[in-house]
Amino acid sequence: MSRFDYDDLIQKQKDELDKIKTAVEIYQSEDKYDFERKKFKTENFRFFSIAILTAIISLGSSYFIESFKRDSNNYQSVITNFDLLERYYQTEKDKTTKDKLACELGDFRNTIKDTKIENGKKKYDSICKMLAGLHEQKEKISNVDTNKPIIKNALTEIDKNAESIRNLQKKLLTAPTVEKNKLNEKIIEANKNIEAIVNNIQEVKDAARLTDNIEKSVRQEIKINTEQQQEASTKNINKSEVTWFKIGYFLQFENFRITLQYLDKKLGIQVGICTTNNGSDCEKTILTKAWVEFDKPLGFTENGKSYRINLEAIDHAGKNPFTLAAYITFESITNQ
């Protein structure tokens, strides 16, 4: 509708103006109806568009979720996830984290029923249960009051006899054949003394039994971890069996004597290393007050050959169930 000429409207009579007014109202009414009709169409279109878009998104989300579920059941995906978790366990140095990972592996969801994963799950589940048992046994040992006079005196006697055994064994290394029988008899007697002291006090007897279980479990865990490390290693390494010693004592590997000078469950151990050819006295000092940490083996060279000492565990062991020992392995490395 074209705009009006207001000068022209002023010149018109009233009856003509009334007719124009009526015509305008009819036009506006039709225009409004047309606008509402177009608005209705537009809103309907928007409504249906949103509904369709929502349906597409919903279907897409469902497809994504189903794809994720299928992926979790996908053979290669499950294999990869287990391998990654196992590799994490094998390389982890923190003992607490490593123990948790063993339990995670034991509880792994083997949705594809893979035989290799199932065997791995059983192995790690066994480690997890063993660790739970170890924790309980250690708690029982730690709850014994070692300041109680009868227990304190008993432990002093045990340590004296253990020291006597150590000195006798050292003499055996270089003793003439005629003296060895007497030395062995004294060692047997000292062991009997220890056994009698342990059996005489129930709390010490119980702790000694628990310590034997702890030692077996620690050895088992170390053995499993060592086998896995050897499988992953490409180097030519000759690794000893795990063995333990306490502060002031030594271990002999080839012609090397490793003496334990200090021990701390968090920091690791401090050792001295010397060479001995006759198995008795040190002839050459290689290292003294050298640190060995759980995640940092101690390496050294002698006569062009490489060697390494690994700290495998710090735990209960030996005749005195209340003192800690360091479990170590010794490696001879062939350079290629």
Image: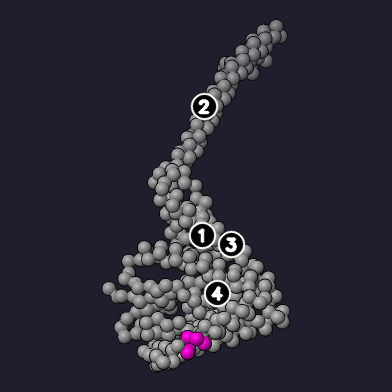
The residue that mark 1 highlights is 127
Q: Which quadrant would the C terminus be assigned to in this image? A: bottom left
* Mark positioned earlier in the residue sequence (2 or 1): 2
Q: Amino acid at mark 3?
A: Gly
Alpha carbons under labels 4 and 1: distance apart: 19 Å
Asked whether residue 32 is in view, the answer is: yes
Q: Position of residue 319 (x, y in %)?
A: 57, 78
Mark 2, secondary structure of its residue: helix
Q: Amino acid at mark 1?
A: Ile
The residue that mark 3 highlights is 133
User: Nearer the viewer's eye, disc 2 or disc 1?
Assistant: 1
* Mark positioned earlier in the residue sequence (4 or 2): 2
Mark 1, secondary structure of its residue: helix
Mark 3, secondary structure of its residue: helix
The residue that mark 2 highlights is 52
Q: Is residue 275 above or below residue 107?
A: below
User: Nearer the viewer's eye, disc 4 or disc 1?
Assistant: 4
The residue that mark 4 highlights is 317
Q: Is residue 303 left or right of residue 187?
A: left
* Mark positioned earlier in the residue sequence (3 or 4): 3
- 100 in the magenta segment: no
How many residues crowd mark 1 within 10 Å: few (<14), some (14–19), many (20+)? Answer: many
Q: Position of residue 305 (x, y in %)?
A: 32, 81
Alpha carbons under labels 3 and 2: distance apart: 59 Å
Q: Foreground: 140 or 288? A: 140
Indicate the quadrant where residue 50 lies. Answer: top right
